[in-house]
Image (tube, rainbow, N blue to C red):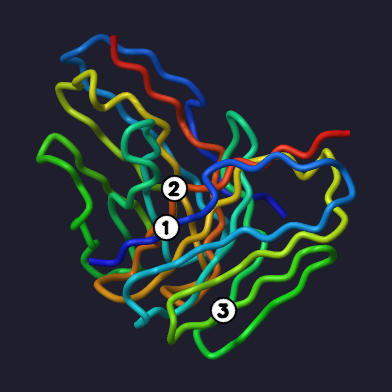
Amino acid sequence: KQEVTQIPAALSVPEGENLVLNCSFTDSAIYNLQWFRQDPGKGLTSLLLIQSSQREQTSGRLNASLDKSSGRSTLYIAASQPGDSATYLCAVTGGAGNMLTFGGGTRLMVKP
Amino acid sequence: GAGVSQSPSNKVTEKGKDVELRCDPISGHTALYWYRQSLGQGLEFLIYFQGNSAPDKSGLPSDRFSAERTGGSVSTLTIQRTQQEDSAVYLCASSWSGPPSEQYFGPGTRLTVT
């Protein structure tokens, strides 16, 4: 059974810092990995999708990497802003079925 | 274009009552997923529809839960004889096809069972 772990569970940083969020998964037989953002009381917004054959994806200040063989992904946020404050979730598709298996999330607070 | 929509946004019901939750996927998306987000369990998969294929129901927690998708578009998740542990946010997602396509999520329905 696929298990996804995110470290740290919570993170507080001052505005302007670069930061890294970590995600690990136990079964390397994945189709893809997605990073999501969730604001309080809201649904999930997809940030980046990395296919299993890719090593990284970039969107603006966000960069996600994937090392499938070691079961790890990182989300790098450059020059953090207070508006980046949210919960960040990683999820993988593949393995036992077609569903997304989610990590527990990292709750990020960026202080002005 | 329009994203995934869900209704109602909030639902409060008494224990033992039945509830129906609705999901309108993005037009043209053939795959539709239901997930549940609760405090104790995080985000977990419930059921997956792909085109006209039989749905993958492997995530449904009990036989009180069922879902259907009419005309390959709108989906309804039904919970019979609701229990307090059913309280959660129910999220719907859709994608162009099955994996490895990107899934797009709706805003969710917050269900509270009193």
Cβ atoms under marks 1 and 2 closer than 8 Å: yes
Gap in angstroms between the C-alphas marked 1 and 2: 6 Å
Asked if disc 1 and disc 3 are in contact, CB closer than 8 Å, the reply is no
Badge 3, how many Cα within 10 Å: few under 14, some, many 20+? many
Corner quadrant of residue B112 = top left
Image x and y of residue A8, in percent: 54, 50
Q: Residue furthest left?
A: B63
Counting from the top left corner in percent of width and height, residue A21 is at 62, 58
Q: Where A68 sits versus A22, above or below?
A: below
Depth check: give the residue in front, B89 or A4: A4
Q: Chain of mark 1?
A: A
Q: Quadrant of the C terminus of chain B?
A: top left
Q: Which numbered disc covers residue A66?
A: 3
Left or right: residue A36 versus residue B25 is right
Location of mark 2 (residue): A104
Secondary structure of the residue carrying tag 2 is loop
Residue wearing tag 1:
A5
Q: Are marks 3 and 2 in contact (CB under 8 Å)?
A: no
Does mark 3 fall on the same chain as mark 1? Answer: yes
Q: Is A85 in front, or is B2?
A: A85
- Mark 2 Cα shell of 10 Å, populated few (<14), some (14-19), many (≥20): many
| In the image: residue B39, left or right of residue A97 | right
| Separation (CA) of disc 1 from disc 3 | 14 Å
